[in-house]
Image: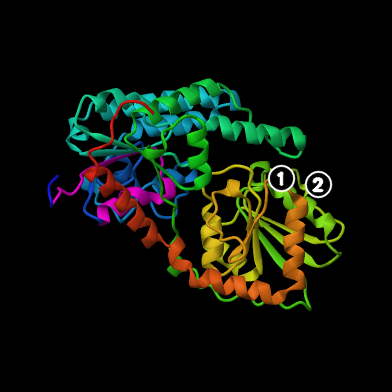
Amino acid sequence: MSDNPQKPRVSVIQAGARMHYAVPILLHRQGMLERLYTDIYADGNSLLGFSKRVWPKGVPQGPIKHIFQRSTSELPASKVTSFDLIGIRYATALRMASNKQRTNLYLRHAKSFLTKIAEQQSIFDSTIVYGFSHVMMEILEHLQHHDVKIVLEQQTPPTSEYAYQVNQESELWPSWECNTPIFWDIHKWTQRENAEWSAADRILVPSSYVQEQLILRGVADHKIMCVPYGVSTHLYKGAVSNYEPTRPLRILFVGRVQLAKGVQYLIEALKYLKPNNVEIRLVGGLHIQREYLVAPNASIEVIGRVPRSEVQRHYAWADVFVLPSVCEGSATVVYEALANGLPVITTPNSGTLVEEGKTGFIVPVRDSEQIADRLSRFVDEPLLVEQMSQTALDGAEKYSWENYERNLTAAIWNLTNNKEIAKSGS
């Protein structure tokens, strides 16, 4: 091995604007980004970029508004290749698709997108190709014929785990959700996942929960590296939580108000608490019937979905944060809550960074009584709220964007310098 290895040249395959292009942006900062391949990008010399620049001021953008937002000033247009027609066709069809049609629609889109990328010779000039779960399968065979290493980001638990957990919630809480998700063609999703896991040289996961689920499904432990996400901690002017026992404890929930996020267990926990000891604020898109979001002994304020710019004032209002998720990769709202100095009550299945007993509490999944017990401790011990809040603020570096950048970069370098990784097997 050379004492001065060449800096990796990484091409990123990304459908959509996940985490607002965090991975390509961070790789570009490190001088590693060869190219971003994406399905829609409204910048540079593309037709969408031109349309965005000449769109008359004051004229409503309607449904195209979110498409015009698909770009970032932190990437040079020369580093981006987009297939806008494929992306627009998919976005249009998705708006009209039924729940049952969405799987096949998504898979057709992924195939068209990846086939187009495979036609670009430039993808094979990279030393590493970085892609995301479910959007890699059709290009794997092409990559394996070249001297290119494959990094897969498995950002969520496997489909079979997610389907199992959410379907279980639907059975436990029938009629709660406005549009209960129905999982069609799980075999097609797991087929893609298995092919991607097998071909990948390195699989990056955001939490130990996702890592454990992959190992349970036969993925070799040595392939997996845990790289938690991060947030821009400097944007959050966190202060030590100042809970006064003369008023109710303020509890905040941020995220989709749905069964998968476990909001039902927060509501159920209220029946174990003394009357008027807490008040709850639910911030996020509403997927639960409103009639269930009530409690006789506590105030529940349903805010609904708000712009990102307004979320901060809700963090500032709260004393503690609760997210009792039953299944997700790693909830960035928990990172935000900690950066704001809020003690957190959550579950192992949220992909949490919470340190048990230091920055909050980790309770078992589906355990309303344990949630109630921890809330009661906060009510009875105001000093505990203050102590955990201070510890969360002191450890903000752990959930920072900069820490994520360091860990992501280290994972890429680790793969570049490791000659022991074989492409065979999973």
Q: Which residue is mark 2?
A: 291
Q: Which residue is mark 1?
A: 366
Locate residue 240, reporting x and y percent: 58, 76
Instruction: Verify CB contact (< 8 Å) between mark 2 and mark 1.
Output: no
The answer to whether residue 314 is left or right of residue 110 is right
Q: From mark 2 to mark 1, how far is it between C-alphas? A: 21 Å
User: Is label 2 or label 1 in front?
Assistant: 1
**6 within the magenta span:** yes
Regarding residue 279, the answer to whether it shows in the image is no
**What segment is highlighted magenta in the picture?**
4-29
Local secondary structure at mark 2? helix
- Compared with 238, 366 (above or below) is above
Is 34 left or right of 274, judged from the image as shown?
left
| Closer to the camera in the image, 369 or 178 | 369
Coordinates of residue 30 in the picture (x, y in percent): 24, 55
Q: Label 2 sits on what residue type?
A: Glu
Q: Say which amino acid is labelled 1.
A: Arg
- Tell me if mark 2 has few (under 14), some (14-19) or many (20+) residues whose alpha carbon lies within 10 angstroms of its own: few
Side of 351 relative to 71 (left or right): right
Q: Residue at x 20, y 44 (%)?
A: 9
Quadrant for the C terminus, please. Answer: top left
Q: Which comes before the other along the chain, label 2 or label 1?
A: 2
Q: Residues within 10 Å of mark 1 (few under 14, many from 20)?
A: some
Determine whether 18 is above or below 248 in the image.
Answer: above
Tell me, yes or no, if residue 221 can be seen here: yes
